[in-house]
Amino acid sequence: MKAAVLETFHQPLVIRELDLAEPGPGEVTVEVKASGLCLTDVHISEGKVPTVKLPLVPGHETAGVVARRGPGVTEVEAGDRVTVFVDVSCGRCDFCLRGETNRCMALRRIGFERNGGMAEFVNVPAANVERIADRVSFEKAAIIPDAVASIYRGLKTVGGVGVGSKVAILGVGGLGIQGVKIARLLGAQVTCTDLDDRKLERARSFGAVHTINPRRESFLDAVRQRIGSFDVVVDNVGRKETVFEAVAACRNGGRVVAMGYVDPVLEIPSYEIVIKEKQVLGCRACTRGEFREIVGLVNSGQLDPDIGELVPIGNVNEALDNLRHGRYLTRTVLTLPFGRQ
């Protein structure tokens, strides 16, 4: 099969032929139709994810068709249209037994510690696939496992967002823009910040009430003078200044959901946390149960994932460069099959 392979950090992916093993017990082979492109893929290519070993086929946002079933698989059939959950958990540790699969002690992730979806085929546990409705395109289904599901967890589970909540989302790129739709679905009023006016316009089209470009207006000034504080602030940026602002913008007892992690050390004002009982909570990926929930919302038509440019997978290196330099407006998706090389 053809695959885009990361052979050396800081070097372009190489498109080459790889052998594909038969699916093992409990596994299925998925014929990949679309693979979402995430900034984490850039971080992987630059050697910033310490658990990644080379060579690797990246791609942790995957949708396609079940091509083959391994021994013991009965829950899906060949020909089923599916999207693929990222985390491969052990099912035996204390976290897994509590349903906290994203905290598994033996976690291995598709597209990180095992080969992912930037290939014609990928073998994954049958337990990781969810059927997608015929009405859902492969391109939209591909981004559910990360761009959609992770911020769903951040807003609903970690943030506790519900009807009447007042929410701020800092950064509305490929991840944050899904959050606007999800927060509105949960019944929240949404404010967004971003340095790109095009992204803010997109956020308004999906129901954001207030949008702020920090180049022109201080977020905290806007909070103090005209918007008021928030029940939940989601920080998709992950810099010291954005976390500081997120904490300051929360109401007493409010929550900051930290999803970005650019700066290795973040600073939090202790007075705000202790005296005003604000909370700063990390959020990574989602549980297997949350993944099933969000797929159900997409399948039913209640949530429509936001995608932008569709790029043939043969142009993956150009796409990674564009992503690295912030040229994409929202989530970009690689499409298969491979063209002639």
Image: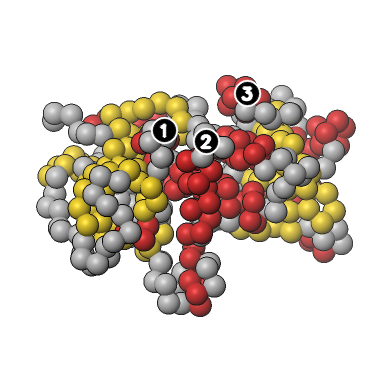
The local secondary structure at tag 3 comes to helix
Q: Which part of the image, by quadrant, shows the N terminus?
A: top left
Count of numbered badges drawn on the protein: 3
Image x and y of residue 319, in percent: 35, 31
Label 3 vs label 1, nearer the camera: 1
Which residue matches tag 1? 135
Which residue matches tag 3? 205
Label 3 vs label 2, nearer the camera: 2
Q: Amino acid at mark 3?
A: Ser
Q: Are marks 3 and 1 in contact (CB under 8 Å)?
A: no
Image x and y of residue 112, in percent: 35, 55
Q: Amino acid at mark 1?
A: Arg
Within 10 Å of disc 1 (Cα), the crowding (few <14, some 14-19, many 20+) is few
Q: Residue at x 13, y 49 (%)?
A: 18
Asked if 104 appears above or below 187 in the picture, the reply is below
- Nearer to us in this view, 267 or 335: 335
Image x and y of residue 248, in percent: 79, 47
Which residue matches tag 2? 301
Q: Are marks 3 and 2 in contact (CB under 8 Å)?
A: no
